[in-house]
Amino acid sequence: MLSKNGALWYLADRTRYSPSQAPVVKPVSDSSELFRQYKPIEGTFDEVFGKELMPRENVRAAFKAIERLSVPELSSKQELANALFQRGGITFAVNSDARGMEKVFPFDVVPRPIGAKEWERTSLGLAQRVKALNLFLQDVYGEQRILDAGVVPRDLVLGSTGYVPQAAGIRPNHGVHIHIGGIDLVRDESGVFVVLEDNVRCPSGVSYVLENRAVMKRVFPTVFREVQVRSVDQYPIELQRAFETMSASGTSDARPVVLTPGMYNSAYFEHCFLARRTGAALVEGRDLVVQDDVVYMRTTHGLERVDVMYRRIDDDYVDPKVFRPDSALGVAGLFAAYAKGNLTLMNAIGNGVADDKAVYPYIPDAIKYYLDEDPILGQVKTYRCDLPAERSHVLANLASLVVKAVDGAGGYGMLFGPLSTKAEQDEFRGKIEKNPRGYIAQPVVELSASPVFDGKQMVARRVDLRPYIITGRGEPWVLPGGLSRVALVEGSYVVNSSQGGGSKDTWVVAE
Amino acid sequence: MIARVAENIYWMQRYVDRAEGTARMLSVATSMAMDSAGVSLAEMMRSVWIVSGEQERLEKKGVTDMPDPEQMREVLTWDKNPVSIVRCIEQSRNNARAARDVISREYWEALNELWLWICSDEAKRQYENDPIGFYQAVIQGSYRAAGTAAATMTQNETMNFMSIGRQLERAGQTARVLDVKHHAVGPMLEGRADTAEGTVLWVEVLVACSAYETYFRQNRGSIRGRRVARFLLLDPRFPRSVLRCSNRLLEALEHLRITPMVAGEAEEAIRHVLAKVAPHDIDTILDSGIHEYLTSVIEGLAEVNQAMYRDFFLPR
């Protein structure tokens, strides 16, 4: 699931973390048993406690009802939440088990509030970024103006593992490449959201956003009366609207499909969830057949045309005729149907070039180039290992940088310098020297922290955020909030679900 | 609907009904063996064993010795083999998980909860301390799922395939239960005087089909094998009678017709079964040999299953 597609590695500098020296926070209210011992993580931005350890005004209301709870009361709420996830089968499959063992994604019942004003600005920044990324993809697979202008180096783009030469010259229906985007955000030391990475291939996790909210309504029925939280239920409706407006045949009665690798896929729950909530049919490659460049599904009443497909399978696997010949997940002939415009694929083929981590440093320039606007959201300083000067800086500072594979995700293929051993650094030195285009490096970014209930009290834990952006015809739509992932285990710096990470319900709250 | 998904939900329903049927038989056997003079648990379990298909499966493997009754009960409840209650519930729940886009959330939760419960320590404890209660809980779980489906799902293709799975499984179970008992109390059907032991066995058959109370509402006087057989085969209203199940199966198949005028092979097959159960009176059936008759009904139902593949499940 999240381990495959996310920027989950989020870590911070361990050497700065010394809980014993950190001052104890003033409780939100003096009588709060839960917050009595709460200590912010030194050097990180605490999302709830601000100057002089006073609760921040814009999120304070969200905690008013929760801080009153006793430890046993909050424990029983946590238990209820866990039971609801079990019962709903809201699980992800663990990859290592061929039979598809299912696990519940750990969930912390303490909400993560974000003030509405801050969200407004962030949301504009996300829409702006996705718009520009979409124009970039149109351009790269079309006229290549941005490459001619030298704003983004041509070799970098055409040499990207995410660049699909077969897609050159193909304009997807209505020119939309990124119907569903997930842009990972983290807060810097001053608490400002910056973009950590873009996910414009198959970003996952949105089902947890909606399920987390449904569970929270059961767990804190009264809190929702006291705090104005923005709803997330619009997501499937927006997705359905995108299905409808993107349909290749233009007929509104065409049935959309969600293409899944099958029930043993780690994100199968989400594939099912999206199909259920949008009325799409959930199909596997073996349910599909292509005749005369038109895709059909095999139904109990014979073949039925498919003209819009939300596919949750990577480019490489969608069509064995064009991409990996050994793949049984897609269907032969699908690419030709797509190229002819007989099928809308969501997302389009070849989007990987836009979320390549070595292309990422150029996205602010691309925003300016296409939209003639300044980027609303900042991003993290990035060193390209294919540039000799930057490479030598990276190689000289491996112990203090974060090195990532340009097409990697989920904490795989990366080195977290401050916590790495000499041997690991040497291994990456070798990798970078062998394939400099394959790696980038970034300075360590502090994450922000938010209170988490550990069963006894509130403790500060690091969080990141993945908002989701849907684009149909017209302006991009941004889901209020997004998936907050949290490093639940003390001493762990990873929000990856396979390594003690969990999630929280994100509340965009009225101020 | 997607052909693969249709097959999936058809089996989802068959499996949960199979678990329910096995639980009902085991519940009766466990209960009656406790206090019915002249009936041993071994005898009771033997018939459950045969109905479940374990006997046949083991014979094919060359195993002729029957396990002791406690072992049988264990195997039919927990074992890794595909006929055990826990495996049937797991199968049903896994099929449901793979078909969540076509069933209601509530129905999925009902099946998932049944599965979570049977995997829990609580269920294992109950099995040890209160086996009848344990089997009742399995049956209740299946009822709950069925009621949830009826209350939350629209009468569409999905429900029709579920209904076919359910009715086919039920009809088959009733026919098998009767067939197994026919061997045990064969002479009674030929009109000989009912014995105390015979009465106990017919009570078991009725309870195994959840038919005990309904039977006595409709039949005054002492329990007779002939009447029990008539009730379970030919009653037009009882939900587990072969006739009723076959009629409902036909109804679902008629709804699934692609063109209103053309019947599929499955529909032909169930009409064939109906021809065996509808017009007959029980005497004709008994005269021609109940075992042969039930065998032909069971084979007819198996043919419906085969025809479902040709009509709907195999990709065309």
Image: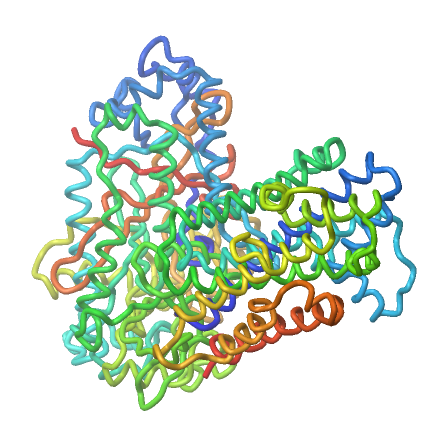
Q: Residue furthest right?
A: B65
Where is residue B298 drawn, in percent x and y?
A: 66, 69
Observer-nearest of A462 and A289: A289
Observer-nearest of B30 and A301: B30
Instruction: Tell me the quarter of the image containing the N terminus of chain B.
Output: bottom left
Where is residue A143 drawn, in percent x and y?
A: 16, 80
Q: Is residue B231 visible?
A: yes
The residue shown at (56%, 47%) is B142
Figure disc tally: 0
The type of colouring in the image is rainbow
The residue shown at (41%, 40%) is A503
Q: Which residue lies furthest to the top in this view?
A: A31
Observer-nearest of A27 and A377: A27
Q: Can residue A316 be seen in this view?
A: no
Where is residue A396 drawn, in percent x and y?
A: 44, 55
Q: In this view, does B251 lie to the left or right of A222?
A: right
A260 vs A498: above or below: below
Observer-nearest of B71 and B167: B167
Q: Which of the 4 quarters of the picture holds residue B288?
A: bottom right
Q: Residue furthest bottom?
A: A292
Q: In this view, does B155 lie to the left or right of A493?
A: left
The residue shown at (66%, 73%) is B299
The residue shown at (24%, 60%) is A240
A479 vs B270: above or below: above
Instruction: Tell me the quarter of the image containing the C terminus of chain B.
Output: bottom left
Where is residue A79 drawn, in percent x and y?
A: 49, 29
